[in-house]
Image (cartoon, rainbow, N blue to C red):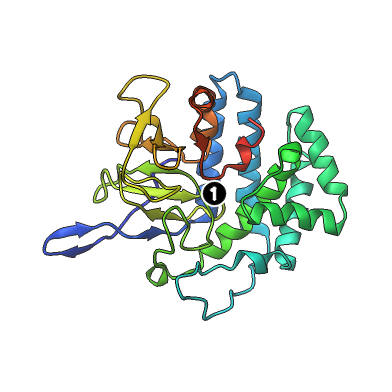
């Protein structure tokens, strides 16, 4: 994702303090993601799929502008819980309207045949089937036999959650647990070592749902919270900008991006674009942590 963050960190004793959280600007997030997918599609064996995801991201950006504003969130949720209550969203008419609008808009996109068949199935699905799809995404779960259909549900959930998160007060957000989004409770899609002036080399995890970015300790497993047995692997050189952060304690891994080496890296688009690293990690016996609905089935 092209760098759009402009932090205004507080200063304590003359030393900048990294903000805990960056809330998403939905239009900017999806537009930037679309551009990155388009760039990656030019020189990749996954070109058609990446190009489709770029068009889908551009559609998400348009929906973030054209859909009616979501209703205000209920107040008073706290006690170490994410501000957005995901289970309550399952019966939110605005989320179901977002899915309907996304399916209508996606009908005009070029896409691989499996995605086209899945889109037709989702578009024709009844209320209970759509509720099932959305419920799985809201719980960061995708059954192995229906990944394509869940892609469109995930895209709708991302739009709705990002629009809700954008309206939160960043000062009211607090940590709710390692590897858990403080805004909506989602799992991270990846983490990024930042290059923005003032927060150079600080790590932020990116929520797979609402796109909120929150600060995490640089060397720590985002799956179990351990700071022991952390290692890094890459499909390229030791200085690679994309690596798998591995944990010997829980036997998991998650990608970490180094924008200090490549300012253009996007936590979602480059996760798909670096599929070769996923294929390499399959042979390690480690499980992939986090959640990425666009990589389900790979």
Task: Identify the image quadrant of the C terminus.
Answer: top right
Task: Identify the image quadrant of the N terminus.
Answer: top left
Residue occupying image coordinates x 55% and y 32%: 272
Horizontal side, residue 129 vs residue 21: left or right: right
Residue where numbered disc 1 is placed: 208
Horizontal side, residue 145 vs residue 187: left or right: right
Horizontal side, residue 43 vs residue 222: left or right: right
Residue 73, picture quadrant: bottom right
Residue occupying image coordinates x 24% and y 51%: 198
Can the viewer see residue 21? yes
231 lies above or below 181: above
* Closer to us: 99 or 289: 289
Q: Position of residue 10 (x, y in %)?
A: 23, 64
Q: Position of residue 239 (x, y in %)?
A: 30, 25
Furthest toward the left, the residue is 13
Can the viewer see residue 277? no
272 lies above or below 69: above
Residue occupying image coordinates x 59% and y 68%: 85
268 lies above or below 72: above
In terms of secondary structure, where does tag 1 sit?
loop
Q: Position of residue 285 (x, y in %)?
A: 51, 29
Horizontal side, residue 60 vs residue 214: left or right: right
């Amino acid at each position: 994702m092209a760098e759009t963050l402009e932090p205004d960190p507080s200063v304590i004793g003359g030393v900048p303090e990294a903000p805990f959280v960056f809330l998403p600007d939905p239009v900017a997030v999806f537009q930037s993601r679309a551009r990155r997918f388009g760039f990656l599609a030019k020189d990749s064996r996954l070109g058609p799929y990446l190009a489709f995801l770029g068009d889908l991201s551009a559609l998400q950006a348009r929906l973030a502008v054209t859909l009616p504003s979501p209703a205000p969130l209920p107040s008073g949720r706290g006690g170490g819980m994410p501000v957005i209550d995901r289970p309550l969203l399952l019966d939110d008419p605005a989320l179901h309207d977002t899915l309907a609008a996304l399916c209508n808009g996606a009908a005009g996109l070029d896409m691989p045949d499996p995605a086209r068949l899945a889109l037709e199935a989702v578009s024709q699905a009844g209320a209970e089937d759509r509720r099932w799809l959305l419920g799985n995404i809201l719980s960061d779960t995708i059954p192995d036999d229906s990944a394509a259909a869940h892609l469109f549900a995930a895209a709708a959930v991302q739009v709705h959650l990002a629009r809700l998160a954008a309206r939160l007060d960043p000062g009211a957000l607090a940590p709710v647990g390692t590897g858990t989004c403080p805004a909506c409770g989602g799992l991270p899609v990846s983490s990024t070592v930042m290059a923005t002036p003032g927060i150079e080399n600080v790590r932020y995890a990116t929520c797979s749902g609402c796109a909120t970015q929150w600060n995490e300790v640089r060397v720590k497993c985002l799956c179990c919270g351990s700071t022991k047995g952390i290692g890094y692997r890459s499909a390229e050189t030791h200085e690679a900008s994309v690596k798998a952060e591995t944990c010997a304690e829980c036997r998991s891994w998650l990608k970490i991006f180094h924008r200090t080496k490549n300012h253009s890296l996007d936590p979602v688009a480059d996760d798909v674009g670096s599929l070769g690293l996923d294929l390499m990690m399959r042979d390690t016996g480690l499980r992939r942590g986090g959640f990425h609905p666009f990589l389900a089935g790979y």
